Structure formats: structure tokens, C-alpha cells
Amino acid sequence: MVPVRVLARLGRLDTFRALQHRNFRYLWLGQTGHSATLWMDQVARAVLILDLTGSAMMLSLVIATRLVPILLFGILAGAVADRADRRRLLLTTQCVTFSTYVFLGLAVTLGFVEPWMVFVTAFVAGTAMAFNQPVRQSLIPMAVPKEDVLNAVALNSTALSFMRIGGGSFAGVLLIPFDTGGVYLVAAAIYAWVLYTTWRLSFPSDRGRAKPDRSLFADLAEGFAYVGKRRELAFVVGLAMILFVFGFPYQQVFTPLLAKEVLDMGDSGVGFLAAATGVGAFVGSLVVASRSNLARPGLQLLINMFVFGSVLVLISLQATTWGTAALLAVAGSMTVTYMALTNGILLERSDPHMHGRVMSLLSLDRGMIPLGAIIAGGLVELLGVRPGLFVQGVLVLTFSTIAAVVAGRRLASIRSAAGRPRESRAPEAVAAGRAGGA
């Protein structure tokens, strides 16, 4: 297949070295298609609910509905990922996501869509996503050797970031000649490619799976105890909650409102601002990929949080379209590099058989985004779009300062394993990454 062969050649470059492993190439291609439709959905769903209701609070509630399954099922998903056939589980979640795109596309196109349908499909898609993300992340260490994990995580983030540009922009362009139904039908067609790339994955080993005679709840308890005994992991997971609760609503609540109500850019403007965020995210993920031997990734997490909070404050004070877009690009860069470093630290510093449960704790943090979305919607209703965003930025800065005082020294002591000599890679990891040939 031509795309796979091109990626194999690209893997010869150090920045893209994780792509030399066959399984990761297919995993990365699947992430690319998945991310494209994820951002198309984010743009289309925001436009659809605003067109149906015209309410900022309803927009916040739809976002909360889509993300609350992560809070409900995220921990369970990690334990399942550590004991199930990960490839099959990933295929199942993707089939569910594909079905929601088809349903919404037909509902809008045929003219029978109702607000409750937007909420129901949001919950179903969110449930699939709750299981999808821990599984996908836990497959990365099985596809590459340990010293390439941070590079692979960064390249995974690059796919997500690039498709934030491509998917968000593409959705914005499609909204010019078509309605949101057309966007969802195109997203469903793209997702067929995602299903194919997942089907092509091949992991012959059962490595990383929990023993079948243990109960699921015992696995859950073990995951909490494992992170609790490793203070640096606990601090990394805890710090991420600030970003998920007070940070991420900037792109899910405030960006659509800035485009439609403040800057008067219309429906396609939502895609434009999402793409602007993606430009910064794409650049940031490439920087992490090329600097995967970053000496102190924990310290960089704190720096990113302070820069990000400051940028949110500046966006709230910005009155021009291009100035807003430029600042959104910086915000996107900060969030994607933050998440790439967080994922890399957690995967590097935890045992392979615990990867699913450790990553599911991060999903539990992500499950707090609905709370942040509701807070953001309430701030908009009470104060307006720009003042509400200003408060969000101040909250990020305030809690980041508290985190720096409490855990700054421990976070600064974290060092990346990516800088170790490449000769030290585990033979079994190399074999897993190359499983199935080139």
C-alpha cells in the first residue's frame, strides 16, 4: 500500500523514527483518520446544536454529554484494555463511532433531526471514545521499543493536531455548500479507512494483558494503588486535571462562540478558528517529536500551563479575527505538547502490564471536561463570552501556581528515558514493533 510505504521511508528520519515499525504505521494512519473525523464532528456538532437551539448553555451540555462517559467508563476501559484483545476492542469502538456519524448524517439530510438526537449520539460516541483512547494509547508501547515511545506519542499527537487543521478546515469548507448532514456523511466515509487500518494491525503476543483469573475490580484497585505508590505519576495525573477542567473548554465552548457571536464569522468561521488552533498544535507536536530526548519533561509541563493560562487571558482581550486566530494557535501548541509529554511520561515510567490502567486514570481526568464545559457555559451566560474566557484563563494560572508550589520539585525531577542509547532497546519490544514485516 502506497501510504504505508511512504511512511516507512519517512521513518528513516530521526524525527519520524517510530514510523519504521509496521504496527505503528497502521496505528498512526488510523489515528489520522480518526482525528480528522473527531474534529469534523466537533465543528459540525457545535454548529448543529447552535442552529437547533441558539443556546450557549445547550452547546455546553452537548459537550458535557459527549464527554461524561469518559468519567463514567474511563477507569473501567483501562482495566478492560489490559485484559482484552485490544485490536478487537478498538474495532468495536470504531464501529460504534461510524454508526453515529451515519445516523446523524441521515437525520440531518432527511430532515428529521431533533436536539435529543444530538445528545443521544453524543453520549454513544463518547462511550466509544472512553474505551477507544486507553486502548489506542496502550498499543503504542507494544508497537515500538521503549526509547521510541515519546517519539511515537508525539507523532500520534501530530496526527491529531494536523487533522485538527485538516478536519476542522474541511468541515468549515463543507459547511459552505452543504449542511451538517453532509459533513457527517463524509466523516463516515473517512471512518471506513480507519476501520481498515485497525483491521491490518497484528500483535502476535499477549504481552501486557492481565491474568484471566483476576477480577476486573481487583485490576481497578491495583491501578489506583500502583499510581498512588509512584508520586511522580500521581502528580502528573493530578496536574492534568487543571487543563481538562479549566483549559479545554476554550476550544469546545469558547471557540464556536467567538466565531459565531463575537467575530461574526458564521458557521464556516468555527472551522477556521478550529484550524487556527490546529496549526499551533501541529507545530507543537512536531517540536516534541524532534526533541523526544527532552531532559526535564515534568518541568516543561508546568511551563506549558503558565503560558497556556496567559494566552487564554490575551484571547479574551483580543478584538480582531487574525489576532484571535494567532493566539488560538499558541494555545493549541501548548495543549498538544502538554498532552504528548504527559502521555510519554506515564507510558515510560509505568510497567507494560499496567499501561491500560495508568492511561485510564488520565481518561478519568479527561472525564472532568464536562464539569469544565458546564462552568464555561455558566460563565458565558453570566458574564459574556470574552469576560468568561478571561476568568477561565485566570483560573488556569491560579491553580497552576498552587501546583508549582505543591509539586514543582517532584515534577522537575522527572527525566525522560528517550535519551538512552538506542542499543539498549528491549529485543522483545523491537520484535513487537516489527511484527508482520514491513
Image: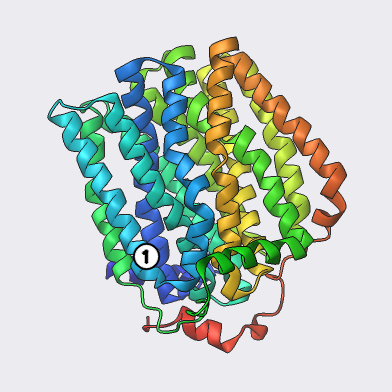
Left or right for 349, reference 371:
right
State the count of labels.
1
Q: Quadrant of the C terminus?
A: bottom left
Q: Is residue 220 visible?
A: yes
Image quarter of residue 305: top right
Q: Is residue 7 visible?
A: no
Whole-percent x, y for residue 275 in the image: 44, 35
Q: Identify which amino acid the numbered label 1 is placed on.
A: Leu
- In this view, the residue farthest toward the top is 383
Colour theme: rainbow
Left or right for 317, reference 434:
right
Q: Is residue 313 above or below residue 76?
A: above
* Residue at 50 percent of width and 27 percent of height: 253
* Residue designated by label 1: 89
Whole-percent x, y for residue 393 in the image: 68, 27
Q: Is residue 8 above or below residue 182?
A: below
Left or right for 198, reference 320:
left
Question: Nearest the camera: 379 or 393?
Answer: 379
Q: Quadrant of the N terminus?
A: bottom left
Whole-percent x, y for residue 8 in the image: 41, 72
* Residue at 58 percent of width and 25 percent of height: 375
Secondary structure under the numbered disc 1 in the rendered image: helix
Image quarter of residue 104: top left
Whole-percent x, y for residue 237 in the image: 68, 52
Image quarter of residue 22: bottom left
* Residue at 36 percent of width and 20 percent of height: 50
